[in-house]
Image (tube, rainbow, N blue to C red):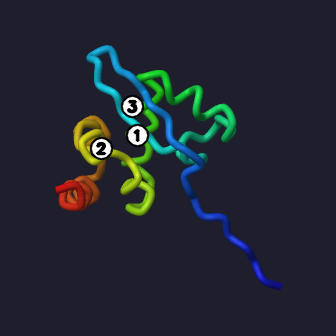
Amino acid sequence: MKRTFRFARSIGTVRCEFASGQKVDMPVIPGILKHPTPDMLPSLLRDPEVARKYTIEALRFAAWPILAQFPREWLRECLDRAGLRPSREKALAFLLS
């Protein structure tokens, strides 16, 4: 029997506006946050705190093809807050440079 795997992929983008006036277009990728359903995720990502947590979780666990869909400046901004293992932080810093 053949097994089919579904790989993580973006189902759209959402613009999140922060109090500082910064606007970030983020990919909507189900599975980064555990509990929201794919149809709930776009409305949740408009909240700046959820967007930041979503990005930090992506930095912690997502593969590079997923992270490459995020704006690089936004990933660099969240990298310090992610609390990554030194080896992963170093690798992501290199990929984002």
State the residue position of label 3: 52
State the residue position of label 1: 55
| Residue 16 percent location from the top left of the image | 43, 27
- Place residue 34 in its image quadrant: top right
Q: CA distance from mark 3 to mark 1?
A: 5 Å
Q: Residue at x 28, y 37 (%)?
A: 78
State the residue position of label 2: 75
Query: Circle 3 sits in a helix, a strand or a loop, which is it?
Result: helix
Query: Label 1 near label 2: C-beta < 8 Å?
Result: yes
Query: Circle 2 sits in a helix, a strand or a loop, which is it?
Result: helix
Q: From the viewer's perspective, is 19 left or right of 90? A: right
Q: Mark 2: which amino acid? A: Leu
Q: From the viewer's perspective, is 51 left or right of 29? A: left
Q: Earlier in the sequence, mark 3 or mark 2?
A: 3
Q: CA distance from mark 2 to mark 1?
A: 7 Å
Q: From the viewer's perspective, is 2 left or right of 92? A: right
Position of the C terminus, as image quadrant, is: bottom left
Q: Earlier in the sequence, mark 2 or mark 1?
A: 1
Q: Residues within 10 Å of mark 3 (few under 14, many from 20)?
A: some
| Residue 54 percent location from the top left of the image | 46, 37
Mark number displayed over residue 32: none
Q: In the depicted view, which residue is nearer to us: 56 or 46?
A: 46
- On screen, residue 58 above or below 50: below
Q: How many marks?
A: 3
Q: Residue at x 68, y 70 (%)?
A: 5
Q: From the viewer's perspective, is 63 left or right of 89? A: right
Q: In the depicted view, which residue is nearer to us: 3 or 24?
A: 24
Q: Mark 3: which amino acid? A: Arg
